[in-house]
Image (spheres, helix red, strand yellow):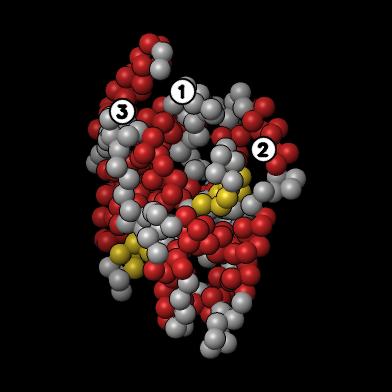
Amino acid sequence: MTAATKRLWIVCAALAIAAGAAAAHAAPTDDLKQFREFFKNKFPTVKFDDYADGLYALPGMDDYRAQWEALNEFPPYELGLAEGKKEWQTPFKNGKTYAGCFKNGGKNTAQHYPYWSDAGNEVRTVEMDLIDCLKKNGEERAFTTADLDKDAKARVQLANLTAAFYQLSQGQRVSIDLSKPGALQAYEEGKKFWWQRRGQLNFACANCHMDLAGRNLGGNQPLSAALGHPIAWPAFRTVWGQLETIHQRYATCNSQVRAKPAKHGSKIYNHLQLYETYLSTGLPLTAPTVRN
């Protein structure tokens, strides 16, 4: 890392601390307004809906966008998505399917995930509901019992199935309900995680995906903007060569700042996903898609 790069890390860390302190006691609606204003000021030429395209919508990303558009002519995630669709459509031994576990057969519902469940007193993700659907129907798959941090094959199977579910809602605009006390508390915990510095690099999520969004900090690619980030997952990263879950992305982000990742499916990652998804309210779902 060059001296200039180190100085940039330090400056951005200070910015994130200051922004985090200012945002600590804001209501979700205020957070949302400030979050949108931040990116409107940072990238004034980028239209709101264009953030659904992730990194490729940002200024100066013409070469990356051209590569991304070329990849999308024959999307590399199609094989994984096909496997997910097959799993979704194949009847269980009792004759039922996953569709029977979801409102409207799973169509046009993913835009409301994650959500707060009073019954379970917890945040629920799509992956959790898919796994519970299997259990309720007396079925088992590798991903229902595997350690998803260690068993990549099982995790990708779950990502493929989740991608099939999200595709049923492509284009639907994110709308997260935070009206229940439990949802608000979970949101605040996710918010705290987002702004909290961690790891040997002493970095928060905001350092990379707000302050350094669109910049290449000594890596192989520029950093994506936080606005629109969660709506693409499960996504196919070109460096991974497969569809993956958003929790796997969180884990690798934590590892990159030399912090110990939380477990896949952990409460804190569920709460982080709730916070991050709420901040993309109004954007259309694009998952599954390709990301660098």
Sequence order check: which comes first, mark 2 or mark 3? 2
Q: Return the residue at label 3.
A: 201
Residue closest to the eye, 68 or 83: 83
Where residue 54 appears, x then y in whole percent?
56, 39
Mark 1–mark 3 CB contact (< 8 Å) = no
Residue at far top of view? 3
Mark 1: few/some/many CA within 10 Å (<14, 14-19, 20+): some
**Quadrant where the N terminus is found in the figure:** top left
Q: Residue 185 is drawn in which quadrant? A: bottom left
* Camera-side mark, 2 or 3: 3
User: Relative to 86, is 273 on the left or the right?
Assistant: left
Mark 3: few/some/many CA within 10 Å (<14, 14-19, 20+): some
Where residue 208 appears, x then y in whole percent?
41, 31
Residue closest to the eye, 81 or 34: 81
Disc 2 is placed on an element classified as: helix
Q: Return the residue at label 2.
A: 68
Label 2 amino acid? Trp
Mark 2–mark 1 CB contact (< 8 Å) = no
Sequence order check: which comes first, mark 1 or mark 3? 3
Residue closest to the eye, 172 or 218: 218
Q: Residue at x 59, y 71 (%)?
A: 87
**Against 246, is 19 above or below?**
above
Q: Return the residue at label 1.
A: 217
Kindly report the distance in space between the C-alpha atoms of the residues bearing marks 2 and 1.
20 Å
